[in-house]
Image (cartoon, rainbow, N blue to C red):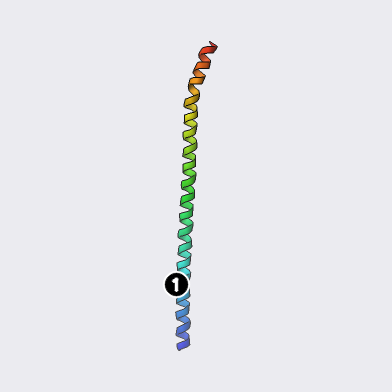
Amino acid sequence: MICENKSTSSDNLYETIKSLLWEARAKSNFSTNFYTVQAYWNLGRMIVLEQKVTRMLALPLVVVLCISYF
């Protein structure tokens, strides 16, 4: 009888530890994915801003070239 209780107790402990580790892994994966998505979002934002600045700087050059052509 005592051996059966130890087995059950050990099984419960094992299952509890297993659950805790799986939960920690799931949270870790979620956190990693969140920060990866955030990094890509910021990279995209930086690229778009750079493109806007480049267009704004290029516009006066286009105007000057068009005026000098005519």
Which residue is located at x 49 percent, y 49 percent? 36
Q: Nearer the viewer, residue 2 or 39?
A: 39
- Give the class, few, some or many, for how many residues have Cα within 10 Å of label 1's Cα (few <14, many ≥20): few
Q: What amino acid does circle 1 point to?
A: Thr
Does 18 appear above or below 47? below
Which residue is located at x 45 percent, y 67 percent?
20
Residue drawn at point x = 44 percent, y = 72 percent: 16
Q: Quadrant of the N terminus?
A: bottom left
Residue at 52% of width from left, 15% of height from top? 66
- Residue at the right extreme, as displayed: 69
Q: Position of residue 40 (x, y in %)?
A: 49, 44
Relative image position of residue 31 (x, y in whole percent): 45, 55
Pinpoint residue 67: horizontal percent, then vertical percent: 50, 13
Looking at the rendered structure, the secondary structure element under dot 1 is helix
- Is 40 in front, or is 53? 53
Residue bearing mark 1: 16
